[in-house]
Image (cartoon, helix red, strand yellow):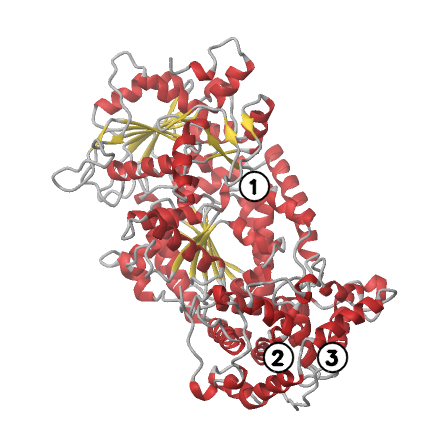
Amino acid sequence: MTGQIKIPEHLNPQHISYLLAKSKSLSEDKVNGDTLAQHTWDVVSRLADMKRLHPHLGINNFWERLFWGCFLHDFGKAASGFQERLRDNKTPNKWSEGQHRHEVLSLAFLDGLFPQGHEDRFPIICVIATHHKDLYHKEDERSIFRKYGRRNRHIEKKDYINRIDFLMSQLSARVIIDLWDWVEQYAIHWQEYFNLGDSSAIQIEINRICSAESIISALDDMSDWVNDFNPMEYDKKPISECDKRLAMLYRGVILTSDHSASAGVGKFPDMALTSDHTMKPLIGRNLHYHQSAMQTAPMGHAIMVAPTGSGKTEAALLWATTQMAYKSASRIFYTLPYQASMNAMANRLAEKYFELSFGSEKNDQVTIQHSRATLKFYQDAMDGDEKDAHKSSFRARTIKNRAQLNYFPIQVFSPYQMLKAAYALKGYEALLLDYTDALFIFDEIHAYDPKRLALIISYIGYLAQHFRARFLIMTATLPPLIENSLTEVLGNVTKIEADAGVFTASQRHTIKFVDGDISTQIERIITHYRSGESVLVVCNQVQTAQMMYDQFKNHPQKDFHPLKKEKDEQGNPIKDANGKDVITGNIMLLHGRFNGIDRRDKEALLMHYCGVDDRSYRRPVIVIATQVVEVSLNVDFDTLFTEPAPLEALLQRFGRVNRGRPTAGLCDVHIMTAPYNENYMPYEAPMVIKGVDILRVSYDGSPIDESQVDAMLAQIYTGDIQAQWETEYRRAKSDFDRILGNITPFESADIAIMKEFYRLFDGTQVLPVGCEKAFYDAIEQHNYFEANQYLVNITNGQYHQLIQYGLLNTEIPEGEFAPHAIVPYDSEQGLQLNEAISRAKNPIQTPLEDEDE
């Protein structure tokens, strides 16, 4: 990846070409290394990108201040000790042994341009001093920002002065003169070249001062400003919220500009999405009311309620282009709750709207952000034009780096990615810059429990109020409690609902309640299958789904075999006359405890036979799944058998049946009245029972009217259910508001806050013993992305259960990524966790190691 553009000859300060910014190994120029001037040019180039992408930030000399901060930020790299390490491959010297910081030395030049009293002085200090690490990073001299501020410099003063004197000794007279010549002869011309504000907006008189006193006064100014966050201690007014946010944005810009320049990502792309793009999937179709209403929606936030399958994604992008017509936005964030649905949406956006392959190098518009994003980038590369594993790994890392640098205009992610900034995780200021004036599309917001929803909605309000973000909340089901919470933080919200005709046309399902649990329905499911139907069976727990799969596999008539691709002796897929993979079998199990390879293969098989976009290969199948099927795949089944679940979840399950068909009709969806073994987990029993009762009273034996869903939800969220929801929500919101209120510019989260953030995630990965050989084969080939595909997700509770019963080796071998689980695994059943724990509880049974005998 290279994005470096050489400095034009007339703007190139050749007299400082002897000063380096990066060693040869880390440079674009592998022969000589990148010069200080070239790296600074690259940083200012990326700064110009930030100005282009964020035109509404141009107030209070914002870009002029950032230009000067970026221009000066690495002057301290001219230190002789720093230069020596760049040229001699990081040979230890006094500079490295003293853990000195070049950005502190850069401050020595500040008084010569922005002396005490200059109105632009402080922001430029911030940009220079914090472009690498937080203010209070331990064990380097930037701890002096707290330790040696004007109010609290004390007995360590001698050591402090010695360190500053050492920094100054690293700059020779010649270097100081050459750097000042660079400032005088080139700085303004660079500013004009990049159009980074008005060169006369900041009044500058160059005095060629370079001194220890400049460093000390700059540090004192910053220390004083930071101490103002403690008004009780210093009897001063606290820094205003506006100044705090501005300080965060200054740092966000320098972090993005500096890091992207160092990574060589090149020019940041513009948002390519236009109204022409958004209309592509709608050509030849009459727009629904909720879609056309998005084209005239006023500027600001909106809530859209429309049934599943009625074109909500198309409507959302129409809203986005309408909002951009009112006020430009360089970023769109599309949020979804599950990784599989994120992956599917990213593919859809890239292919249908931009005619780009998501995994190709040409895709500069759409990306994903989640914990396994790099693995998807790798898999897409291997499936596409790049079959070499190592080249695909390189491409995956390249795309991941770009995504982390906020390079892509459209990002598909979960709200937890957004909350990284709320918890002030490292680099959060760069995220806040990306969120400023951005558009957010929230899909399936009902999928989160009250505690997490409190965080998400509170942060939605925070970004809307303080960073001018605009939000679209779209859903098929919106409980009144959630709607009220959204309007509480967003204020004026435009609500758009699908019209009666859309709801009538969306009637695709006849509700049929079945007394008993799912295990009693084996023969009925088989009857539907033998009549030529594709049948979806949804269970609430993995162990129930595995039990059901066994029931079919062990059926007396031996009719059911796993759905799989046929392969030749070399392991290559066998193709039919049309070049399609030959697939055999008629039954599949799909849940969240498969490894990445098996999960992906299963989803591809589903799309082959049950996909909405290509119906040419449809055939009868039985798919037994858990909640992973609810919103992850654009599939169409003929009928459904489901365990009881909350109303919102049931509607999502219904949405996988009779989906996207060209002609209207009704298909049966069967709801059990009882869960298997009377276990309602992972749901709260009262929510399920009340929702099922209300649905049964109104629609048993008849088509469901989704226009009445909100009314049914209003009946569910009453009494004890409402009280419990509100209690959990308010308590979580109060705790989260405290975290938001304590964010301090130039500081990242401490360990305690980081732990609070990571407690939001209930999951970890393990390597099953059955996958060890494939894992080690990939490791031996140094193909770590391939190896990563053999890990399986489990919850934290399950992790501790495995430890309790001696089924987990928690000592991770060197060079590996996850503990080894002594739990059976195969591509049909996935991780057989409950079986392993049951055996461990009752060791009289046949031990695991004998199961193949």
Dot 3 corresponds to which residue?
214
The x and y percentages for residue 706 are 39, 41
Q: Nearer the viewer, residue 487 or 728?
A: 728
Q: Is residue 728 above or below residue 352?
A: above
Q: Mark 3 or 1 closer to N-term?
A: 3
Q: Is residue 17 above or below residue 380?
A: below
Q: Amino acid at mark 1?
A: Phe
Dot 2 falls on a residue whose secondary structure is: loop
Residue 761 numbered mark, or none: 1
Q: Quadrant of residue 291?
A: bottom left
Residue 645 numbered mark, or none: none
Dot 1 falls on a residue whose secondary structure is: loop
Neighbourhood count class around disc 3 (C-alpha, 10 Å): few under 14, some 14–19, many 20 upward: many
Q: Mark 2 or 1 closer to N-term?
A: 2
Q: Quadrant of residue 326?
A: bottom left
Q: Nearer the viewer's eye, disc 2 or disc 1?
A: 1
Q: Is residue 543 above or below residue 629?
A: above
Residue 644 shows in the view: no
Image quarter (top left, top right, bottom left or bottom right) of the C terminus: top left
